[in-house]
Amino acid sequence: MNRIRNFCIIAHIDHGKSTLADRLLELTSTLSARDMENQVLDDMDLEKEKGITIKSHAIQMNYNGYRLNLIDTPGHVDFSYEVSRSIAACEGALLVVDATQGVQAQTISNLYMAIDHGLEIIPILNKIDMDSAQPDLVADEICDLLGCDPDDIFRVSARTGEGVPPILDAIVEKIPAPKGDPDAPLQALIFDSVFNSFRGVIAYFKVSNGCVRKGDKVKFVATGMEYEVEEVGALKMKLIPEAEVGCGDVGYIITGIKSAVEVKVGDTITHTARPCEKAIAGFEEVKPMVFAGMYPVQADKFEELRAVLEKFQLNDASFVYEPESSLALGSGFRCGFLGLLHLEIVQERLFREFDMDVITTVPNVSYKVYTMQGEVLDVHNPSGLPAPTLIDHIEEPYIRAQIISKSEFFGPIMKLCLDRRGTLVSQHYITAERVELNYDMPLSEIVFDFYDKLKTISKGYASFDYHITGYRPAKLVKLDILLNGEPADALSTLIHEDNAYTFGRKMCEKLKDLIPRQQFDIPIQAAIGAKIIARETVKQVRKDVTAKCYGGDVTRKRKLLEKQKEGKKRMRQIGTVQVPQSAFMAVLKLDS
């Protein structure tokens, strides 16, 4: 055990975590030169295309007789749950900061998470070879944050490999060996899992006490299910089978589980014959922030979608779902996500990995509704809202937003936050050039396009992080969209009273452009209760019925037009309006 080191790499998005991991793999000869490629741990096509890490990736390296287990983590705020799981399986962390950008919001939140878990922090200043790098200035920021000495900070360029070799020695010297008793009953934490159509569920775990061997009888504490171990081994670029995974080590386990529901990330594995006294604590529950409905494009694919979501949840434990039905879209699922980027990634992954095309409804957040009878209801969906006469008041979730930016963008960022009903809590200058702002804001105001707007007005410099602080009363109304007099429940939203009129008008204008013309007029209306607040009309496609009436009496033309009008009226009564998928997604980009 003294020769094992478990560590993760944490940083803000795009500060060079995956590139640093590449250099460490090269230096420990974990990969041959032929297999090496840029960001080799980002094995998903989507990760390479977008240039971001979506999943944590665990890999084992050997260095001077030591076994180093590295977990490369995502940097985007929407995937912070992946980071919390990686931190739970480690004793140390490499904190990477970009010398051109300095300390960012996500750097701070990931660092606090690591400190709360008692991890040993090794600070690293990356990208020192860049022309715009300010290593001394950023080193001072890191010293203020960590209270460390400037000489403790490693100055490296992960791209060129400059200054990277000493990091390996620092990992061995500074990060403590895992604690645990090899002779105690088995106690292992599952921190990730994947589904393999041939082998079943493959769980990745870290052993806290005891050890696990091939052929052992094991039990999963949360589900109470018992299995025989078919295979255990180490996580390298491929899965390497071994006779046992010892105390303090990280590895994988295959028990032939075919049902995805039986494995829960954060569960504890123990022996059936000699179980541990209690499950491993300190693993945080996932809290979805954004909810949206997912429906199969063809109604008969509902069961297929259920099976796909089960398998997908294995690989993405922060994704939650439950069945629901909609008048417009039939049977589907109410899904919870950590943010809009997470929603976009899930939709894309379902299509690429499982060939499952889904319709996604307008995202919204979860509200607490207090009724006149004193009941408290959790409402994720506007259609679940009781009648207005039964509601006493509604509370919405609030967040504490932390924004770090160059001081020249201070004004526009304050205006953006105030427009989104934010209240300033504190501000302080990290340096003369950079300012940190803390705001209390409703979660619903940042769900749509706040992050994009923030990046635009700050020319990409501002960084953003948030955490939920609780619920507060709000003046909310349910805004319905009526198409041809029928409410389209998939388009209805809960919105603040002051923004309802503007939002309703924009919705109608947008839908007018997106809904295809029919043989009859389609009125598009935005309504609050029985009150219509905005209206647009999609004009009908008309056939020129009077073309054959040349010359003669005008009454002949009028008679034909009257006949056509009757037909249009009847069509409108029995006609249905098909809403394209682009209309559901367009609601997110109303301002563009």
Image (tube, rainbow, N blue to C red):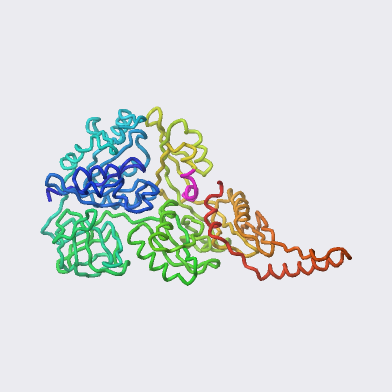
Seen from the viewer's position, the closer of residues 487 and 561 is 561
Residue segment shown in magenta: 442-452
Residue 258 rendering spot, x and y as whole percentages: 29, 69
Q: How many numbered dots are placed on residues in this image?
A: 0
> What secondary structure prevails in the magenta region?
helix
Residue name at image x 15 percent, y 45 percent: 63
Residue 42 rendering spot, x and y as whole percentages: 32, 50
Residue 444 belongs to magenta span: yes
Residue 293 lies left or right of residue 86; in this view the side is: right
Q: Which residue lies furthest to the left in this view?
A: 183
Residue 371 lies left or right of residue 172; in this view the side is: right
Residue name at image x 14 percent, y 59 percent: 210
Residue 169 rendering spot, x and y as whole percentages: 17, 39
Q: Residue furthest right?
A: 553
The image quadrant of residue 262 is: bottom left
Residue 445 belongs to magenta span: yes
The image quadrant of residue 12 is: top left
Residue 484 rendering spot, x and y as whole percentages: 65, 63
Task: Establish if 271 lies above or below 100.
Answer: below
Seen from the viewer's position, the closer of residues 83 and 521 is 521
Task: Establish if 418 lies above or below 297.
Answer: above
Residue name at image x 55 percent, y 68 percent: 327
Residue 348 lies left or right of residue 254; in this view the side is: right
